[in-house]
Image (cartoon, rainbow, N blue to C red):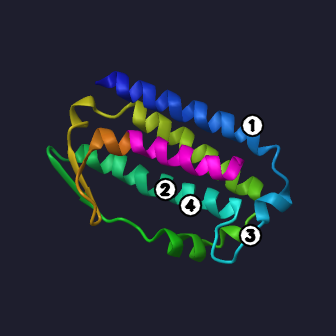
């Protein structure tokens, strides 16, 4: 099953490299724009992806410490975004942090112990997932939000 890890790590690297290149075409005004007060700006969406990286980083490491079941909390994404004031941070700083964090996650994914991919993961109140799904879904979730930023 280590091909899943190689494919996912490679897909993550390709995704962040492509997105970072395309981010250069987004104006500061577009990064800052909030169409409605309750809707995240592009910077806040990127901040959410940083939060996702931080939360999943711990999951990716800790799920390898168990033999069969891993339990962790979910997180309140709106609270995280609002309390970190991503809207007030320059887009370039957020891009650099997001990019560096995901390069590290690609490395973590590449080196996951393949024997742990079947570990059952309980995240918050959600139904259980396999560790393999948690890893691949991380990239799927990122791509979904990058589409919002890049549209």
What is the magenta range?
136-151
Mark 2 → mark 4, Cα distance in angstroms: 6 Å
In this figure, which residue is indicated by the disc labeled 1?
A: 21
Residue at 47% x, 34% y is: 107
Q: Position of residue 56 (x, y in %)?
A: 41, 52
Answer yes or no: do the residues labelled 3 and 2 have beta carbons within 8 Å? Answer: no
Q: Is residue 131 above or below residue 50?
A: above
- Mark 4 or 3, closer to the camera: 3
Residue at 29% x, 65% y is: 124
**Of the residues under marks 4 and 3, which one precedes in the sequence?**
3
Residue at 49% x, 68% y is: 77
In this figure, which residue is indicated by the disc labeled 2?
A: 52
**Residue 141 shown left or right of residue 133 in the figure:** right
Answer yes or no: do the residues labelled 3 and 1 have beta carbons within 8 Å? Answer: no
Answer yes or no: do the residues labelled 2 and 4 have beta carbons within 8 Å? Answer: yes
Mark 4 → mark 3, Cα distance in angstroms: 17 Å
- Residue 42 on the magenta segment: no
Mark 1 → mark 2, Cα distance in angstroms: 21 Å
Q: Position of residue 11 (x, y in %)?
A: 52, 30
**Of the residues under marks 4 and 1, which one precedes in the sequence?**
1
In depth, the one of 36 and 104 nearer the eye is 36
In this figure, which residue is indicated by the disc labeled 4?
A: 48
> Residue 110, which numbered label?
none
Mark 3 → mark 2, Cα distance in angstroms: 23 Å
In this figure, which residue is indicated by the disc labeled 3?
A: 35
Residue at 38% x, 31% y is: 111
**Residue 142 shown left or right of residue 61 in the figure:** right
Mark 3 → mark 1, Cα distance in angstroms: 24 Å
Mark 4 → mark 1, Cα distance in angstroms: 19 Å
Q: Secondary structure at mark 2?
A: helix
- Residue 137 on the magenta segment: yes
Q: Secondary structure at mark 4?
A: helix
């Amino acid at each position: 099953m280590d091909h899943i890890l190689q494919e996912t790590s490679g897909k993550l690297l390709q995704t962040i490299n492509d997105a970072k290149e395309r981010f250069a075409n987004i104006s500061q005004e577009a990064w800052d724009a909030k169409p409605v007060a309750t809707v995240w700006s592009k910077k806040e969406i990127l901040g959410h992806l940083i939060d996702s990286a931080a939360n999943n980083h711990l999951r990716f490491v800790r799920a390898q410490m168990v033999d069969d079941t891993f339990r962790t909390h979910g997180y309140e994404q709106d609270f995280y975004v609002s309390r970190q004031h991503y809207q007030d941070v320059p887009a370039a700083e957020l891009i650099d942090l997001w990019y560096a964090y995901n390069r590290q996650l690609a490395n973590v994914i590449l080196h996951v112990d393949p024997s742990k991919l079947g570990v059952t993961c309980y995240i918050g109140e959600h139904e259980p997932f396999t560790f393999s799904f948690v890893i691949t879904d991380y990239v799927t979730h990122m791509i979904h939000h990058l589409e919002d930023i890049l549209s």
